[in-house]
Amino acid sequence: MSEQQTGRLYGVGLGPGDPSLMTVRAVEVIAAADVIAYHSARHGRSIARSIAERHLRPDHVEERLVYPVTTEATDHPGGYRGAMEEFYADAAARLAAHLDAGRTVAVLAEGDPLFYGSYMHMHKRLADRYPTEVIPGVTSVSAAAARLGTPLVEGEEVLTVLPGTLPEEELTARLATADAAAVMKLGRTFPTVRRALERSGRLADARYVERATMNAERTAPLAEVDPESVPYFSMAVLPSRVDAPRGDDGDAPSGDAGDAPHGDRVDAPSGASGRPGEVVVVGLGPAGPLWLTPEARGELAAAEDLVGYTTYLDRVPVRPGQRRHASDNKVEAVRAEFALDLARRGRRVAVVSSGDPGVFAMATAVLEAACEDPYREVPVRIVPGMTAAHAAAARAGAPLGHDYAVISLSDRLKPWEVIAERLRAAAAADLVLALYNPGSRSRVWQVGKARELLLEHRAPDTPVVLGRDIGGPGERVRIVRLADLDPAQVDMRTILLVGSTQTRTVRRGDGTDIVWTPRRYPEA
C-alpha cells in the first residue's frame, strides 16, 4: 500500500477588499481547495472571508483562526507575545492535521499574504514541511494610491512603508527622509503618526485613506481627520513629490542651476510670494549619503531652492521642481545674501555645507548676514552634520577620547600670528588637536611651520592621523609620527589629528594600528 501524499498549502492574497480585485489564480485556488482557513477576532467576523465569500462552496471545510487578543492587554503568563506565539503554534498544528490527511489548505489573506499579513506566521511554521504556493495580491498601499488618483512614486523616488506602531521619534526621522511613504496600521496609533508627520514637516502633504476599495471607503487630507474616527484598516500616504507644488514664481526645470549667486542681490520685496520663506543651513557630513542625518535628508528634500559651493551641491540628488544655485567656494558672503534674498521672496532655501555647517563653514556666513538689514526677519535654522574631525577620528580609533581643540590652519581669514599663538597655547595645555584646512595649492608652508611649533611641546613620536577624503572614493587614513609629518602629503581634503602626551598607538591582533586617547588623565 503506497504512503498517503500530504496536502498542499496555499497562501492566497485577496487584494485590498473589493472582491473584483482578486486575481484569477486566487479564485482558482479557492475553488479547488478542500479547506479554507482565515483569521478573525473573537467576534467571529472575518474580512478575508467576506471578500472570498462568493467563491466558497457548501462542502468547504472552514477553519476559523480566532485571535486570542487584538491588543497588547492580556493576562497570559508570557504576555502579548507569549499569547500570540501559542496561538500561531496551535493554528499551525490545526492546519498541519489537514495537510497530513492529504487535504489542500488555502489560507486567505487580505492584500498580499507576505506583506504585513497574518498568513506569514503559518508560512514560517509549515512551508518547510509541506508543498506550498503563495498567490500574491494587490496591496492596500497600491489600492490607496489608486483611490487617491495620485502617483505614489516616480522616476528614482523611493517608497517607504512604515507601521504606525513604531515609536514617534523613529516615525519622525523616517518620514523626514522619505520621498514618498505609506504608514499602515493606524487606528489607535493615529495621534502618534499625525504628530510625527507634523514634526517632520510633512503633514500638509499627507493624505488619509480608509478601507480603500471597500463600501465604507473614505479619503481626506490627513490634517482634517478626527482621530476618534480612525479604524485599523486605514493608512497615511505621502505621495510622490514629482510635480508637487513648490512655489509660484517659476521654478527652473530639474537640474537647472537657476540664477547663480555671483554678486547680484535678488531684487524682490519681502513676502512677494505671499508665503513665509526660510533659510536652512544643512550639514552634508564629510561625504556621501551614509553620512547624512535623517533630518538633513528631509530638509534637502523639502527645499525649493538649493544654494551652495558647486562641489557640495553635486552631492545632493537632483529632484524635480527644485532650483539649484551653484557658485565658487570663495563667495560665502555673497552666497549667504543670495539665499536670504530668496527666502525674503517666500522661498524655502537650503544652503548646503560639507561636514557640520557650524564648523568653519556656511552657518556663520548666513547668520552674519541674517543679523543685518534687510534680513533680520528672515527665519534661519541650522541642521548639524557629521564633522570631518569626528569622521577621521572614527576611522583611526578614538584619538579625540579626551579634551581636544579645533584649529584651522588657513590664514586667509585670520593672521598666521594668531594661528601660531593658538597652536602654542593648545599644545602647552596638552590638548589633542584637530587641524582643519592644513594646506592647498596656494598654501604650502603652514603644515611644516605647525609641525615645528608643536614639536616644542610634543615628543617626536606623537601620533598624527592623516585622514583624506573620509567617506569618499579616495579615502585614505595614515598614522605617522609628528616628526615624520610630511607637508607634501597634505592637501585641503586632508584633516590632521595630533595626539596629546597621553595618546597611544596600538597594533591590534589583526595587524591594524589604532589610535586612542585615554579618558582618564594622570594626576599631577
Image (spheres, rainbow, N blue to C red):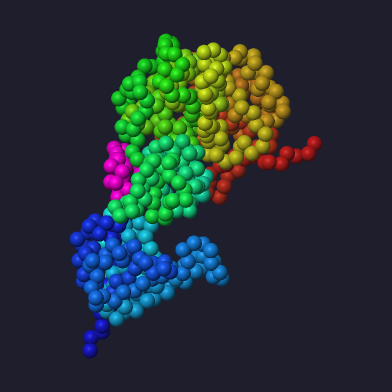
Magenta region includes residue 260:
no
Task: Examine the rendered structure and indicate whether residue 384 appears above or below residue 186.
Answer: above
Position of residue 268 measured from the top left corner of the image (x, y, whole percent): 42, 13
Q: Is residue 439 visible?
A: no
Q: Can you name the residue that lies furthest to the right here?
A: 524
- Which of 35/218 is in front? 218
Q: Residue at x 29, y 76 (%)?
A: 61
Q: Is residue 501 visible?
A: yes
Task: Examine the rendered structure and indicate whether residue 399 appears above or below residue 84.
Answer: above
Q: Can you name the residue that lies furthest to the bottom here?
A: 1
Q: Residue at x 28, y 42 (%)?
A: 149
Q: Quadrant of residue 339?
A: top left
Task: Examine the rendered structure and indicate whether residue 416 appears above or below residue 510.
Answer: above
Asked if residue 491 lies left or right of residue 19, the reply is: right
- Which of 449/216 is in front? 216
Position of residue 325 measured from the top left corner of the image (x, y, whole percent): 39, 21
Asked if residue 60 lies left or right of residue 183, the reply is: left
Position of residue 55 measured from the top left corner of the image (x, y, whole percent): 22, 67
Q: Residue at x 35, y 30 (%)?
A: 245
Give the residues drawn in magenta, as a range.
139-161
Quadrant (top left/top right/bottom left/bottom right) for the N terminus = bottom left
Asked if residue 423 lies left or right of residue 293, the reply is: right
Quadrant (top left/top right/bottom left/bottom right) for the C terminus = top right
- Which of 171/310 is in front? 171
- Which of 134/411 is in front? 134
Position of residue 475 measured from the top left corner of the image (x, y, whole percent): 45, 34
